[in-house]
Image: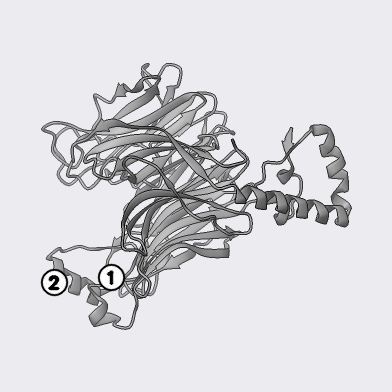
Amino acid sequence: MVSITHLWPDSAIRNTRTPAKVPNAVCEWLKRCQKNEILKTLLAIFLVGCDLLTRAAELSPVVEIEEEVYAFTNANNGAGPMWCHGSTCLVRSGKHLFASGIETVPDAKPLNNCRWMLFERKTNGWEQVYLDIDGRTREPAPMAAFADGRIFLSVNPTRGKGPEPSGGPARPDVLQFKAANPKSPPQSLTPLWQDDPKFAEHSYRSFAADGAAGELILFQNIGYTHAEWTFRDRDGKWSAQGRLKWPWGAEYDTPEPIRVCYPNVTIQNRAVHFFGVSDILEPYRAWRDFKRELTGQQWDYDFRRLFYTWTPDVTKIPFAEWVEIASRDKTCGWLSPGDLFLAPNGDVHLLWTERALDERLRPKFFPDARQSHTLNYAVVRQGKVLRRLALLESTEEKPGLIASVPRFQVSPEHRLFVVYYAAGKDETGKAISENRVSQIDFDGSVTAPIRIPFKQPFTIFFTTTVRAGSPPSQTLEMLGQRAGNGNTISYARVRLDTGTAR
Protein backbone atom coordinates (compact mmCIF):
# COMPACT_ATOMS: atom_id res chain seq x y z
CA MET A 1 0.00 0.00 0.00
CA VAL A 2 1.26 3.50 -0.81
CA SER A 3 0.00 7.02 -0.27
CA ILE A 4 -1.75 8.79 -3.17
CA THR A 5 -0.20 12.07 -2.07
CA HIS A 6 3.24 11.07 -3.38
CA LEU A 7 2.17 10.18 -6.95
CA TRP A 8 1.75 13.65 -8.44
CA PRO A 9 4.18 16.56 -8.38
CA ASP A 10 1.32 19.09 -8.42
CA SER A 11 1.29 20.98 -5.13
CA ALA A 12 -2.50 20.65 -4.77
CA ILE A 13 -2.04 16.90 -4.59
CA ARG A 14 1.40 16.53 -3.06
CA ASN A 15 0.63 18.86 -0.17
CA THR A 16 -2.68 17.21 0.70
CA ARG A 17 -2.12 15.37 3.97
CA THR A 18 -5.03 12.96 3.67
CA PRO A 19 -3.59 9.52 4.48
CA ALA A 20 -5.30 7.95 1.46
CA LYS A 21 -3.84 4.47 0.96
CA VAL A 22 -4.32 2.50 -2.22
CA PRO A 23 -3.18 -0.97 -3.36
CA ASN A 24 0.04 -1.09 -5.36
CA ALA A 25 -1.84 -2.51 -8.35
CA VAL A 26 -3.94 0.64 -8.54
CA CYS A 27 -0.85 2.82 -8.48
CA GLU A 28 0.15 1.79 -11.99
CA TRP A 29 -3.28 2.82 -13.30
CA LEU A 30 -3.00 6.14 -11.46
CA LYS A 31 0.42 6.79 -12.92
CA ARG A 32 -0.87 6.15 -16.44
CA CYS A 33 -3.55 8.80 -15.80
CA GLN A 34 -1.01 11.50 -15.02
CA LYS A 35 -1.23 12.89 -18.56
CA ASN A 36 -5.01 13.06 -18.47
CA GLU A 37 -5.74 16.54 -17.14
CA ILE A 38 -9.45 15.87 -16.53
CA LEU A 39 -8.71 12.82 -14.37
CA LYS A 40 -5.96 14.68 -12.59
CA THR A 41 -8.33 17.53 -11.78
CA LEU A 42 -11.04 15.17 -10.55
CA LEU A 43 -8.54 13.33 -8.37
CA ALA A 44 -7.25 16.59 -6.93
CA ILE A 45 -10.80 17.66 -6.07
CA PHE A 46 -11.42 14.29 -4.45
CA LEU A 47 -8.27 14.51 -2.35
CA VAL A 48 -9.00 18.08 -1.28
CA GLY A 49 -12.47 16.96 -0.23
CA CYS A 50 -11.00 14.13 1.81
CA ASP A 51 -8.59 16.57 3.40
CA LEU A 52 -11.44 18.91 4.34
CA LEU A 53 -13.22 16.00 6.02
CA THR A 54 -10.03 15.19 7.89
CA ARG A 55 -9.71 18.77 9.07
CA ALA A 56 -13.29 18.71 10.27
CA ALA A 57 -12.38 15.92 12.69
CA GLU A 58 -11.22 17.92 15.69
CA LEU A 59 -7.92 17.08 17.30
CA SER A 60 -8.29 15.33 20.61
CA PRO A 61 -4.86 15.03 22.26
CA VAL A 62 -4.63 12.28 24.86
CA VAL A 63 -1.89 12.53 27.51
CA GLU A 64 -0.54 9.02 28.08
CA ILE A 65 2.49 9.82 30.27
CA GLU A 66 3.55 12.88 32.28
CA GLU A 67 6.53 12.28 34.57
CA GLU A 68 9.81 13.60 35.95
CA VAL A 69 13.15 12.47 34.50
CA TYR A 70 15.80 14.19 36.65
CA ALA A 71 16.49 17.24 38.82
CA PHE A 72 19.38 19.62 38.20
CA THR A 73 21.34 22.32 39.98
CA ASN A 74 21.99 25.64 38.28
CA ALA A 75 25.58 25.69 37.05
CA ASN A 76 25.80 29.49 36.84
CA ASN A 77 27.83 29.19 33.66
CA GLY A 78 25.41 30.83 31.21
CA ALA A 79 24.01 27.54 29.89
CA GLY A 80 21.51 24.98 31.24
CA PRO A 81 19.72 21.75 30.29
CA MET A 82 17.63 23.46 27.56
CA TRP A 83 20.40 25.69 26.21
CA CYS A 84 20.78 23.72 22.94
CA HIS A 85 17.08 24.19 22.13
CA GLY A 86 17.72 24.42 18.38
CA SER A 87 18.70 20.75 18.45
CA THR A 88 17.20 18.08 20.75
CA CYS A 89 18.08 15.98 23.79
CA LEU A 90 15.31 13.43 23.15
CA VAL A 91 15.44 10.75 20.43
CA ARG A 92 13.64 7.55 19.51
CA SER A 93 14.94 4.51 17.63
CA GLY A 94 12.27 1.84 17.25
CA LYS A 95 11.00 0.90 20.71
CA HIS A 96 13.94 2.61 22.42
CA LEU A 97 13.64 6.16 23.80
CA PHE A 98 16.66 8.09 25.09
CA ALA A 99 17.30 11.48 26.67
CA SER A 100 20.51 13.26 27.52
CA GLY A 101 20.83 15.35 30.64
CA ILE A 102 23.36 17.59 32.31
CA GLU A 103 24.70 17.43 35.86
CA THR A 104 26.48 20.20 37.74
CA VAL A 105 29.67 18.77 39.23
CA PRO A 106 29.83 19.48 42.98
CA ASP A 107 32.53 21.99 43.95
CA ALA A 108 33.58 22.49 40.31
CA LYS A 109 33.97 26.10 39.19
CA PRO A 110 32.35 27.57 36.06
CA LEU A 111 32.53 27.68 33.16
CA ASN A 112 33.26 23.99 32.51
CA ASN A 113 31.53 22.63 35.60
CA CYS A 114 29.06 20.15 34.10
CA ARG A 115 29.00 16.62 32.72
CA TRP A 116 26.50 14.82 30.52
CA MET A 117 24.20 11.94 31.46
CA LEU A 118 22.28 9.45 29.31
CA PHE A 119 18.82 8.15 30.26
CA GLU A 120 16.60 5.46 28.77
CA ARG A 121 12.83 5.17 29.22
CA LYS A 122 12.15 1.68 30.51
CA THR A 123 8.82 0.01 31.21
CA ASN A 124 8.65 1.49 34.71
CA GLY A 125 10.15 4.88 34.01
CA TRP A 126 13.49 6.53 33.34
CA GLU A 127 16.86 5.01 34.18
CA GLN A 128 20.27 6.67 34.01
CA VAL A 129 22.30 4.29 31.86
CA TYR A 130 25.53 6.26 31.48
CA LEU A 131 27.42 9.14 33.11
CA ASP A 132 30.48 10.96 31.85
CA ILE A 133 32.84 10.58 34.79
CA ASP A 134 35.94 12.00 33.11
CA GLY A 135 35.03 14.99 30.99
CA ARG A 136 33.90 18.48 31.97
CA THR A 137 31.83 20.76 29.80
CA ARG A 138 29.62 23.87 29.84
CA GLU A 139 26.64 22.91 27.70
CA PRO A 140 24.12 20.06 27.29
CA ALA A 141 24.70 17.27 24.77
CA PRO A 142 22.44 17.26 21.67
CA MET A 143 21.37 13.85 20.36
CA ALA A 144 20.62 12.03 17.12
CA ALA A 145 19.41 8.53 16.26
CA PHE A 146 19.18 6.07 13.37
CA ALA A 147 16.44 3.52 12.82
CA ASP A 148 18.99 0.69 13.08
CA GLY A 149 19.56 1.31 16.79
CA ARG A 150 22.55 3.61 16.72
CA ILE A 151 22.27 6.53 19.17
CA PHE A 152 24.58 9.55 19.00
CA LEU A 153 25.65 12.19 21.49
CA SER A 154 27.40 15.44 20.52
CA VAL A 155 29.84 16.38 23.30
CA ASN A 156 32.30 19.23 23.78
CA PRO A 157 34.68 18.40 26.66
CA THR A 158 37.25 20.92 27.78
CA ARG A 159 40.92 20.23 27.18
CA GLY A 160 41.75 21.88 30.51
CA LYS A 161 42.23 20.10 33.83
CA GLY A 162 41.62 22.79 36.46
CA PRO A 163 39.14 25.64 37.01
CA GLU A 164 38.50 27.75 33.90
CA PRO A 165 36.58 30.90 34.90
CA SER A 166 36.96 32.27 31.38
CA GLY A 167 36.52 28.96 29.58
CA GLY A 168 39.17 27.45 27.38
CA PRO A 169 39.94 25.14 24.46
CA ALA A 170 37.54 22.27 23.79
CA ARG A 171 37.60 19.00 21.88
CA PRO A 172 34.25 18.28 20.16
CA ASP A 173 33.36 14.63 19.65
CA VAL A 174 30.43 12.44 18.65
CA LEU A 175 29.81 9.36 20.76
CA GLN A 176 27.94 6.34 19.40
CA PHE A 177 25.84 4.10 21.66
CA LYS A 178 23.90 0.93 20.87
CA ALA A 179 20.23 1.17 21.76
CA ALA A 180 20.16 -2.50 22.71
CA ASN A 181 23.07 -2.09 25.14
CA PRO A 182 23.44 1.57 26.17
CA LYS A 183 25.42 0.78 29.32
CA SER A 184 28.41 -0.34 27.25
CA PRO A 185 31.13 2.30 26.73
CA PRO A 186 30.36 4.40 23.64
CA GLN A 187 32.49 4.53 20.53
CA SER A 188 34.23 7.84 19.85
CA LEU A 189 33.68 8.82 16.21
CA THR A 190 36.25 11.69 16.33
CA PRO A 191 34.92 14.22 13.78
CA LEU A 192 37.28 15.54 11.11
CA TRP A 193 37.36 19.27 10.44
CA GLN A 194 38.75 21.58 7.82
CA ASP A 195 42.24 22.66 8.95
CA ASP A 196 42.59 22.94 12.75
CA PRO A 197 39.73 24.99 14.25
CA LYS A 198 40.18 26.56 17.66
CA PHE A 199 37.07 25.30 19.43
CA ALA A 200 36.05 26.65 22.84
CA GLU A 201 33.53 26.00 25.61
CA HIS A 202 30.88 28.23 23.96
CA SER A 203 30.12 25.86 21.09
CA TYR A 204 26.66 27.01 19.91
CA ARG A 205 26.71 23.68 18.12
CA SER A 206 23.92 22.11 16.05
CA PHE A 207 23.51 18.38 15.47
CA ALA A 208 21.20 16.82 12.87
CA ALA A 209 20.64 13.40 11.32
CA ASP A 210 19.09 11.82 8.27
CA GLY A 211 17.74 8.82 10.12
CA ALA A 212 16.69 6.92 7.00
CA ALA A 213 20.00 7.41 5.15
CA GLY A 214 22.20 6.98 8.22
CA GLU A 215 24.06 10.30 7.88
CA LEU A 216 24.99 13.08 10.32
CA ILE A 217 25.99 16.73 10.20
CA LEU A 218 27.53 18.78 13.01
CA PHE A 219 27.99 22.56 13.10
CA GLN A 220 30.11 24.34 15.72
CA ASN A 221 30.75 28.08 15.98
CA ILE A 222 34.15 29.71 15.94
CA GLY A 223 33.94 33.10 17.64
CA TYR A 224 31.94 35.70 15.73
CA THR A 225 33.14 34.86 12.22
CA HIS A 226 31.74 31.49 11.11
CA ALA A 227 30.66 27.95 11.93
CA GLU A 228 32.75 24.91 11.11
CA TRP A 229 30.76 21.95 9.80
CA THR A 230 31.52 18.29 9.20
CA PHE A 231 29.46 15.59 7.49
CA ARG A 232 29.48 11.84 8.27
CA ASP A 233 28.23 9.65 5.44
CA ARG A 234 26.41 6.31 5.46
CA ASP A 235 29.74 4.48 5.13
CA GLY A 236 30.90 5.89 8.46
CA LYS A 237 33.37 8.42 7.01
CA TRP A 238 33.62 12.13 7.80
CA SER A 239 33.75 12.73 4.08
CA ALA A 240 33.05 16.46 3.77
CA GLN A 241 33.93 19.53 5.82
CA GLY A 242 33.66 23.27 5.40
CA ARG A 243 32.89 26.69 6.86
CA LEU A 244 29.62 28.55 6.96
CA LYS A 245 30.47 32.26 7.03
CA TRP A 246 28.03 34.58 8.73
CA PRO A 247 26.01 37.25 6.92
CA TRP A 248 27.56 40.72 6.85
CA GLY A 249 26.08 43.60 8.85
CA ALA A 250 27.04 46.48 6.58
CA GLU A 251 24.37 48.78 8.07
CA TYR A 252 25.75 48.74 11.62
CA ASP A 253 27.69 51.62 13.17
CA THR A 254 30.76 49.46 12.70
CA PRO A 255 30.14 46.85 9.95
CA GLU A 256 30.73 43.32 11.21
CA PRO A 257 29.73 39.67 10.71
CA ILE A 258 26.32 38.75 12.15
CA ARG A 259 26.88 35.64 14.21
CA VAL A 260 23.92 33.24 13.84
CA CYS A 261 23.04 31.06 16.84
CA TYR A 262 20.46 28.60 18.19
CA PRO A 263 19.63 27.33 14.69
CA ASN A 264 17.22 24.65 13.58
CA VAL A 265 19.13 22.42 11.16
CA THR A 266 17.93 19.54 9.02
CA ILE A 267 19.65 17.14 6.63
CA GLN A 268 17.79 14.97 4.12
CA ASN A 269 19.38 13.22 1.13
CA ARG A 270 22.39 15.48 1.78
CA ALA A 271 20.36 18.66 1.38
CA VAL A 272 21.00 20.83 4.46
CA HIS A 273 18.83 23.71 5.68
CA PHE A 274 19.91 26.13 8.44
CA PHE A 275 17.65 28.67 10.22
CA GLY A 276 18.93 30.77 13.14
CA VAL A 277 18.93 34.13 14.90
CA SER A 278 21.45 36.96 15.10
CA ASP A 279 23.47 36.92 18.32
CA ILE A 280 25.95 39.79 18.54
CA LEU A 281 26.72 42.61 20.94
CA GLU A 282 24.35 45.54 20.49
CA PRO A 283 25.59 47.03 17.16
CA TYR A 284 24.08 50.53 17.55
CA ARG A 285 26.06 52.78 19.86
CA ALA A 286 23.16 55.00 20.96
CA TRP A 287 21.06 52.00 22.01
CA ARG A 288 24.04 50.31 23.67
CA ASP A 289 24.83 53.39 25.76
CA PHE A 290 21.18 53.87 26.72
CA LYS A 291 20.77 50.25 27.87
CA ARG A 292 24.04 50.38 29.79
CA GLU A 293 22.66 53.31 31.79
CA LEU A 294 19.50 51.33 32.53
CA THR A 295 21.08 48.04 33.54
CA GLY A 296 24.63 48.85 34.55
CA GLN A 297 25.82 45.96 32.38
CA GLN A 298 28.69 46.43 29.96
CA TRP A 299 27.16 44.03 27.43
CA ASP A 300 23.82 43.48 25.75
CA TYR A 301 23.04 41.06 22.93
CA ASP A 302 20.98 41.42 19.75
CA PHE A 303 18.45 38.65 18.96
CA ARG A 304 16.35 40.41 16.34
CA ARG A 305 17.17 39.11 12.86
CA LEU A 306 16.37 35.63 11.50
CA PHE A 307 18.54 34.18 8.74
CA TYR A 308 18.18 31.10 6.55
CA THR A 309 20.49 29.33 4.13
CA TRP A 310 20.63 25.94 2.42
CA THR A 311 22.48 23.66 0.02
CA PRO A 312 20.94 20.91 -2.13
CA ASP A 313 24.01 18.73 -1.52
CA VAL A 314 26.39 19.60 1.28
CA THR A 315 29.10 17.36 -0.20
CA LYS A 316 29.16 19.15 -3.56
CA ILE A 317 27.43 22.55 -3.53
CA PRO A 318 28.24 25.57 -1.31
CA PHE A 319 25.58 27.09 0.91
CA ALA A 320 23.42 29.71 -0.81
CA GLU A 321 23.50 33.40 0.04
CA TRP A 322 21.79 34.20 3.33
CA VAL A 323 18.10 35.07 3.24
CA GLU A 324 16.74 37.33 5.97
CA ILE A 325 13.40 35.78 6.93
CA ALA A 326 12.35 38.38 9.50
CA SER A 327 13.78 41.42 11.28
CA ARG A 328 12.93 43.74 14.14
CA ASP A 329 16.19 45.63 13.84
CA LYS A 330 14.55 49.05 13.48
CA THR A 331 12.73 48.87 16.82
CA CYS A 332 15.14 46.79 18.92
CA GLY A 333 12.75 43.84 18.99
CA TRP A 334 13.37 40.17 19.68
CA LEU A 335 13.03 37.00 17.58
CA SER A 336 13.58 33.33 18.30
CA PRO A 337 13.64 30.40 15.84
CA GLY A 338 11.23 27.62 16.78
CA ASP A 339 11.45 24.80 14.26
CA LEU A 340 12.09 23.79 10.66
CA PHE A 341 10.52 21.00 8.58
CA LEU A 342 11.62 19.94 5.11
CA ALA A 343 8.54 18.62 3.28
CA PRO A 344 8.65 15.84 0.66
CA ASN A 345 8.10 18.39 -2.13
CA GLY A 346 11.15 20.42 -1.06
CA ASP A 347 9.26 23.22 0.67
CA VAL A 348 10.79 24.39 3.95
CA HIS A 349 8.35 25.15 6.75
CA LEU A 350 9.53 27.56 9.46
CA LEU A 351 8.24 28.59 12.89
CA TRP A 352 9.39 31.48 15.05
CA THR A 353 8.24 33.90 17.76
CA GLU A 354 8.57 37.64 17.50
CA ARG A 355 8.35 40.69 19.76
CA ALA A 356 8.10 43.98 17.90
CA LEU A 357 10.12 46.29 20.14
CA ASP A 358 12.01 46.98 23.34
CA GLU A 359 9.60 49.13 25.34
CA ARG A 360 12.42 50.60 27.39
CA LEU A 361 13.74 52.36 24.30
CA ARG A 362 10.44 53.37 22.72
CA PRO A 363 9.91 56.84 24.28
CA LYS A 364 13.30 58.09 23.15
CA PHE A 365 14.01 56.26 19.89
CA PHE A 366 10.74 55.13 18.22
CA PRO A 367 7.78 56.72 20.07
CA ASP A 368 5.22 55.88 17.36
CA ALA A 369 6.00 52.16 17.17
CA ARG A 370 3.43 49.69 18.51
CA GLN A 371 4.14 46.57 20.51
CA SER A 372 3.08 43.10 19.36
CA HIS A 373 3.90 39.48 20.11
CA THR A 374 3.40 36.90 17.36
CA LEU A 375 3.87 33.23 16.61
CA ASN A 376 4.80 33.13 12.93
CA TYR A 377 4.82 30.48 10.23
CA ALA A 378 6.35 30.65 6.77
CA VAL A 379 6.96 28.41 3.78
CA VAL A 380 10.19 28.85 1.81
CA ARG A 381 11.10 27.36 -1.55
CA GLN A 382 14.53 27.84 -3.11
CA GLY A 383 15.19 30.79 -0.84
CA LYS A 384 11.94 32.60 -1.59
CA VAL A 385 9.23 33.06 1.01
CA LEU A 386 5.98 31.75 -0.52
CA ARG A 387 3.68 32.23 2.44
CA ARG A 388 3.62 33.97 5.83
CA LEU A 389 1.02 33.64 8.53
CA ALA A 390 0.68 34.81 12.13
CA LEU A 391 -0.65 31.80 14.04
CA LEU A 392 -1.17 33.74 17.27
CA GLU A 393 -0.89 37.47 17.86
CA SER A 394 -1.17 39.85 20.80
CA THR A 395 -1.12 43.61 20.17
CA GLU A 396 -1.56 46.74 22.22
CA GLU A 397 -4.93 47.29 20.55
CA LYS A 398 -6.01 43.70 21.06
CA PRO A 399 -3.96 42.07 23.82
CA GLY A 400 -4.10 38.31 24.14
CA LEU A 401 -2.04 35.21 24.73
CA ILE A 402 1.67 35.12 23.94
CA ALA A 403 3.21 31.99 22.40
CA SER A 404 6.69 30.59 22.90
CA VAL A 405 8.84 27.54 21.98
CA PRO A 406 6.83 26.40 18.92
CA ARG A 407 7.64 22.96 17.51
CA PHE A 408 6.47 20.92 14.55
CA GLN A 409 5.18 17.39 14.95
CA VAL A 410 5.08 15.38 11.71
CA SER A 411 2.92 12.29 11.28
CA PRO A 412 3.84 9.36 8.99
CA GLU A 413 1.32 10.74 6.42
CA HIS A 414 3.04 14.17 6.59
CA ARG A 415 0.30 15.80 8.59
CA LEU A 416 1.93 18.88 10.09
CA PHE A 417 1.08 19.87 13.66
CA VAL A 418 2.29 22.91 15.61
CA VAL A 419 2.78 22.59 19.36
CA TYR A 420 3.58 25.56 21.60
CA TYR A 421 3.26 27.11 25.05
CA ALA A 422 0.67 29.89 25.44
CA ALA A 423 0.48 32.22 28.43
CA GLY A 424 -1.27 35.43 29.42
CA LYS A 425 -4.93 36.39 29.67
CA ASP A 426 -7.67 35.48 27.24
CA GLU A 427 -10.45 37.79 26.01
CA THR A 428 -12.39 37.29 29.26
CA GLY A 429 -9.42 38.21 31.43
CA LYS A 430 -8.82 34.63 32.56
CA ALA A 431 -5.19 33.70 33.21
CA ILE A 432 -3.93 31.03 30.80
CA SER A 433 -0.84 28.81 31.01
CA GLU A 434 -1.07 25.81 28.69
CA ASN A 435 0.35 23.85 25.79
CA ARG A 436 -1.65 23.93 22.57
CA VAL A 437 -1.67 22.04 19.30
CA SER A 438 -3.00 22.98 15.85
CA GLN A 439 -2.77 21.40 12.41
CA ILE A 440 -1.47 23.34 9.41
CA ASP A 441 -3.35 22.25 6.29
CA PHE A 442 -2.12 21.99 2.71
CA ASP A 443 -3.52 25.42 1.81
CA GLY A 444 -1.81 27.12 4.74
CA SER A 445 -4.93 27.40 6.87
CA VAL A 446 -4.68 26.44 10.51
CA THR A 447 -7.14 24.54 12.65
CA ALA A 448 -8.31 26.05 15.93
CA PRO A 449 -5.80 25.38 18.72
CA ILE A 450 -6.63 22.63 21.17
CA ARG A 451 -5.35 22.56 24.74
CA ILE A 452 -3.16 19.59 25.64
CA PRO A 453 -4.55 18.50 29.04
CA PHE A 454 -1.33 18.37 31.03
CA LYS A 455 -1.35 18.61 34.81
CA GLN A 456 1.54 21.07 34.41
CA PRO A 457 2.30 22.65 31.01
CA PHE A 458 5.77 22.61 29.46
CA THR A 459 7.20 26.14 29.27
CA ILE A 460 10.16 24.99 27.18
CA PHE A 461 10.71 21.59 25.59
CA PHE A 462 12.45 19.35 23.08
CA THR A 463 10.66 16.75 20.94
CA THR A 464 11.66 13.56 19.16
CA THR A 465 12.09 15.65 16.03
CA VAL A 466 12.67 14.11 12.61
CA ARG A 467 15.56 16.59 12.29
CA ALA A 468 17.53 14.37 14.68
CA GLY A 469 16.62 11.11 12.97
CA SER A 470 13.58 10.09 15.02
CA PRO A 471 10.71 8.74 12.91
CA PRO A 472 7.55 10.72 12.05
CA SER A 473 4.79 9.86 14.49
CA GLN A 474 1.22 10.61 15.47
CA THR A 475 2.53 10.52 19.04
CA LEU A 476 4.10 13.68 20.43
CA GLU A 477 6.98 13.12 22.87
CA MET A 478 8.34 16.06 24.89
CA LEU A 479 11.28 16.65 27.24
CA GLY A 480 11.66 19.90 29.13
CA GLN A 481 10.68 22.12 32.04
CA ARG A 482 7.13 22.47 33.35
CA ALA A 483 5.48 25.44 34.99
CA GLY A 484 5.91 25.38 38.74
CA ASN A 485 8.26 22.43 38.69
CA GLY A 486 11.52 24.21 39.49
CA ASN A 487 14.81 22.72 38.39
CA THR A 488 13.31 19.48 37.11
CA ILE A 489 13.34 18.02 33.62
CA SER A 490 10.16 16.14 32.73
CA TYR A 491 8.84 13.93 29.95
CA ALA A 492 5.41 13.57 28.37
CA ARG A 493 3.85 11.37 25.73
CA VAL A 494 0.73 12.60 23.94
CA ARG A 495 -1.35 10.77 21.33
CA LEU A 496 -2.61 13.26 18.75
CA ASP A 497 -5.95 11.62 18.05
CA THR A 498 -8.35 12.85 15.42
CA GLY A 499 -11.75 11.53 14.45
CA THR A 500 -10.16 9.72 11.50
CA ALA A 501 -7.26 8.32 13.48
CA ARG A 502 -9.32 6.44 16.05
Q: Is residue 198 left or right of residue 420?
A: left
Instruction: Report the quarter where the C terminus lies.
Output: top right
SS of the residue at dot 2?
A: helix
SS of the residue at dot 1?
A: loop
Q: Nearer the viewer, mark 1 or mark 2?
A: 1
Tell me the residue at 43%/27% (across/down).
Answer: 97
Total labels: the figure holds 2
Instruction: Report the quarter where the N terminus lies.
Output: top right
Above or below: residue 213 compared with residue 441: above
Residue type at numbered disc 1: Asp
Q: Position of residue 156 (x, y in %)?
A: 31, 37
Tell me the residue at 76%/49% (across/down).
Answer: 8
Q: Earlier in the sequence, mark 1 or mark 2?
A: 2
Quick check: can you spot residue 216?
yes
Between the C-alphas of marks 1 and 2, the distance is 15 Å
Above or below: residue 116 compared with residue 260: above
Above or below: residue 231 compared with residue 256: above
Q: Is residue 171 left or right of residue 417?
A: left
Q: Position of residue 175 (x, y in %)?
A: 39, 28
Q: Dividing the picture into quarters, in which one does residue 162 lie?
A: top left
Of residues 238 and 105, the one drawn nearer to the viewer in this rendering: 105
Q: Dividing the picture into quarters, in which one does residue 259 lie?
A: bottom left
Q: Position of residue 146 (x, y in %)?
A: 52, 30
Q: Is residue 195 left or right of residue 474?
A: left
Of residues 186 and 2, the one drawn nearer to the viewer in this rendering: 2
* Disc 1 target residue: 358
Label 2 crowding class (10 Å Cα cut-off): few <14, some 14-19, many 20+? few
Q: Dividing the picture into quarters, in which one does residue 500 lie?
A: top right
Q: Which mark is residue 293?
A: 2
Label 1 crowding class (10 Å Cα cut-off): few <14, some 14-19, many 20+? some
Q: Position of residue 143 (x, y in %)?
A: 41, 35
